Amino acid sequence: MKTFEDVIDFHGHACPGLALGYRVSAFALRQLGERSSDEELVGIVENDSCAVDAVQMITGCTSGKGNLLFKDFGKQVYTFIRRTSGDGIRISVDWKAPEETEEERTIWERYSEGDRTEEVLKTVHSRKTKKIEMILCAGDEELFQFLRAKMELPGEARIYPSIRCAQCMEKVMETRARVKDGKIVCIPCFEVLDE
Ligand SMILES: [Zn+2]
Ligand SMILES: [Zn+2]
């Protein structure tokens, strides 16, 4: 199993969102079994936050492979389904960060206004670190609610033939091509022609 350190390495920094994604992913694998080396596990994420990088690293559900689907719902909800059995889990993150102290609130305001003095950076960093530690140490029940069920699989990742755009001459997947003035074009060329 990949560690939180591996996830930080992939993502580029440590942050609370990443820690939540890590916990969600580790929990999902404990429930559904091993990491997806190919496409046997399908993930559906309902936001595009830092957490999604942890999901990709830990569960092996990746957007490039087509077994990670993004729904732009702005919700901290993560669903995983095992292809062979239809066993699924829907995890809804419901974690409340600890109340900020008066001092932290003031510092945060200064940070938002662009203050990058050492004092401000230190406080912001230590609050972030505190949150990450809390998330990593919390019990599952403090972090999320979940539902286990048999679930419907979204469609398989498909590869479509490419055709050539009549405008820029670059290749484009057939299903993404548009027709403009009787010519087959890609979306960027279609939008430019449209102006
Ligand atoms: Zn991040
Ligand atoms: Zn084009």
Image (cartoon, rainbow, N blue to C red):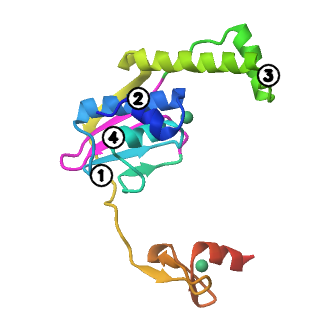
Mark 1 to mark 3 CA distance (whole Å) = 47 Å
| Earlier-in-chain disc, 1 versus 4 | 4
Disc marking residue 126? none
> Which is closer to the viewer, label 3 or label 2?
2
Q: Residue at x 31, y 60 (%)?
A: 156
In the image, what residue type sits under mark 4? Thr
Disc marking residue 4? 2
Question: Answer yes or no: do the residues labelled 1 and 3 have beta carbons within 8 Å?
Answer: no
> Which is closer to the viewer, label 2 or label 4?
2
Left/right placement of residue 157 relative to residue 188 reads left
Residue occupied by mark 3 = 110
Extent of the magenta region: 73-94
Residue occupied by mark 4 = 59
Classify mark 1: residues with Cα within 10 Å, few (<14), some (14-19) or many (20+). Answer: some
In the depicted view, which residue is nearer to us: 44 or 159?
A: 159
In the image, what residue type sits under mark 1? Leu
| Earlier-in-chain disc, 3 versus 2 | 2
Q: Position of residue 169 (x, y in %)?
A: 56, 84
Q: Residue at x 61, y 82 (%)?
A: 168
Q: Position of residue 75 (x, y in %)?
A: 51, 37
Q: Is residue 64 above or below residue 125?
A: below
Residue occupied by mark 1 = 153
In the image, what residue type sits under mark 2? Phe
In the depicted view, which residue is nearer to us: 119 or 59?
A: 119
| Earlier-in-chain disc, 2 versus 4 | 2
The response on whether ligand 1 sits within 8 Å of label 1 is: no
Q: Position of residue 135 (x, y in %)?
A: 46, 20
The response on whether ligand 1 sits within 8 Å of label 3 is: no
Classify mark 4: residues with Cα within 10 Å, few (<14), some (14-19) or many (20+). Answer: many
Q: Position of residue 195 (x, y in %)?
A: 75, 76
Query: Which type of secondary structure does the marked residue at label 1 adopt?
Result: loop
Query: Which type of secondary structure does the marked residue at label 4 adopt?
Result: helix
